[in-house]
Amino acid sequence: MGRCRAPVSVGLLLTLAACAGEGDPPGDATGSAPDTASVVLTSFGGASLRIATPVERIVALVPSASETLLLLGAGDQLVGRTDYDTAQVMADLPSVGGGLQPNLEILVTLEPDVVVAFAGESDVRTNQVLSEFGIPVLLVRPSRIDDVREMIRELGLLTGAEPQAADLIASLDGALSEVSAAAEALPAVRFAYLLGGTPPLAAGPETFLSELAEVAGGVNVLDDLGALYAPVSPEVLVDRPIDVILMTEGSQVDARILEDRRRARLPSWVELPGPSLGEAAWEVARALHPELRGGRP
Amino acid sequence: MTRRTRLGAVGLASLALLPVGLFVGSVGLEPGEVVRVLTGGGSATHRDLVLGFRLPRLLLASILGGGLALAGATFQALLRNPLAEPYILGVSGGAAVGAVIVLALGLTTLASWTLPLAAFAGALLAIAVVFRVATAAGRALDVRVLLLAGVVTGAFFSAVISFILAVSDARTVRSAVLWMMGSTAGADWQTVAVAAAYTLPTALVLIGLARPLNTLAVGEETALYLGTDVERVKRIAFAAASLVTAAGVAVAGVIGFVGLVVPHALRLVVGSDLRILLPLCFLVGAAFLTTADTLARVLLSPTEIPIGVVTAFVGVPIFLVLLRRSTFR
């Protein structure tokens, strides 16, 4: 896939899971007998898998997928979590560790009917081991807003909550068009979204963070960034005309880049690519246009 | 080509490469504009770019590259081991532990100097532990014990880093990994001053020790018979080379291959007389790292490639070619 050619291993980044694999093994889809009810799902990258329904035990290795499942009312089906799932209702579930390279012993012992995992090359082994154990794996990769819609749709199919999934997508799209309408009358704002570090890691145009800001009337000055997220030369950031620098709270950016520039810090939940993207779009819109502050939720 | 002409060619080529990074970067600037800035003119943005970013970065890369190559050559002579490089005594591991602790506790938001300071403290701690062990084994400083203690201490620090990262959140892991890959992107006049203050005097000390180090490279006993104060030379040289490395790691993270490849490559070209090799190492190391840094900024601009990747991509093939042509001494 030409989309992701990150020169550094951003794969260790949970929210920014690395390059997509084509033709990832879809897990053992043939285990279900033909006479039982089943559902056909599509993993990121297009591979399809058949899973026997109803699905009773789910482990999601992707925090935004867990969040989606909770919102779909499938919280009771979740039998495990990762260390990055912070929702109170999941606190008592056993943790499998990180979402990439999880503890496979714990994961397999939880006897999930299906595991939701990151698509990509960064953790091939987990998918291999799970398919050896006959556990189907639904691969997701919420890099762009469209991927998030797709993930919500597939998770709705998986849990038999298609109407709820459609509602989530509708309310996400509703929020996005509201934000877009609110920003329409306002002047375009040139932005760079920096995730911190030296040289600073920045969001390229094909990321949901950049797309959110574009919906809110922003123009990404790093639209030539090839990778999803990549370290950018400080020189470039000083040279390009930037109206506002968007940063996550707690991230550290070279003071010389921030000098004389408007900057806005966003809460860290904005970086979670799930159904909350609608609210995230409002946060980003307020960061881009101070005049929107105090106006809407 | 005689050795003298080869020496001259390498020296001149290095001098010619040194200023390139001022004129070439991730932002296209006309050479004339750079010259205008350097002579006191130019627009405010261009002055910011050249004097605020490119010049300190060029100086930092020169100081670090020179220091690392010099430290590498010193370690190879002292340990009489061709695999020796500046980080062999666990300096990088100690520095990384300091840096990772600061990142994990979120202390970088307090002040920008907390991370380099913690990295420097970690590096000094590693050096102190390794030296204590090496000198405790007997009154003399045993280089074999030093080498082993360094490798083992480094392994321990790696384990500490893995542990801290295993229990840290994604943002800490991301920052730590980016830091450990090494970069001169944070270079400003303050970091240049710190690096220069530690590196330049110690570099002079090391170059001044070239003659006794020459005799040491033959063997400690021989050196002793030739009237070298072996213990004193060893201690000063180890301390100086470690200090140079520690200061470098503190301001720019771990930058591999310079300390290993540059001294060996030069030895193949100009021979192993340290009186020539050590000063040349500083010059060529400086040119090598500034060139690598320029490539890191330019190749995938606006993205920056980790400088360690460039030093490996450029340094290793050159080194292998040289190695194939010559008999390794």
Image: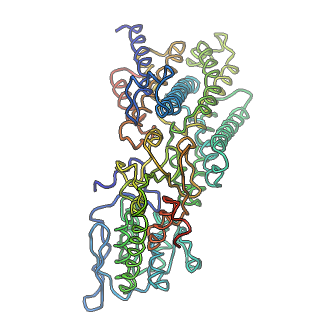
* View extreme (front): residue: A185
Q: Is residue B155 above or below residue B293?
A: below
Q: What residue appears at the point 40 percent right and 44 percent down from the top-left corner? A: B303
Q: Quadrant of the N terminus of chain A?
A: bottom left
Is residue B259 in view? no
Whole-percent x, y for residue B51 in the image? 52, 29
Q: What colour scheme was applied to this rendering of the protein?
A: rainbow
Specify whether B186 is left or right of A229.
right
Question: Residue B297 appears in which quarter of the rendering?
Answer: top left
On the picture, is B319 further left or further right than B272?
A: left
Along the viewing direction, whichever of B136 and B113 lies nearer the viewer: B113
Measuring 36% from the left and 82% from the top, which residue is drawn there? A166
In percent of width and height, residue B179 lies at 54, 45
Residue that extends furthest to the left in the rendered view of this protein? A34
Placement of B47 over or under A252, stated as above or below: above
* Residue B3 seen in this snapshot: yes
Residue placed most toward the observer, A161 or A283: A283
Note whether B143 is above or below A170 in the view shown: above
Name the residue located 54 percent from the left edge and 63 percent from the top edge. Answer: A268
Residue A100, quarter of picture: bottom left
Residue B223 location in percent, x, y? 62, 15
Q: Is residue B63 left or right of residue A122?
A: right
Q: Is residue A160 left or right of residue B83?
A: left
- Count of numbered marks: 0
Residue A229 image position (x, y, % from top left): 42, 53
Residue B319 or A185: which is nearer the viewer?
Answer: A185
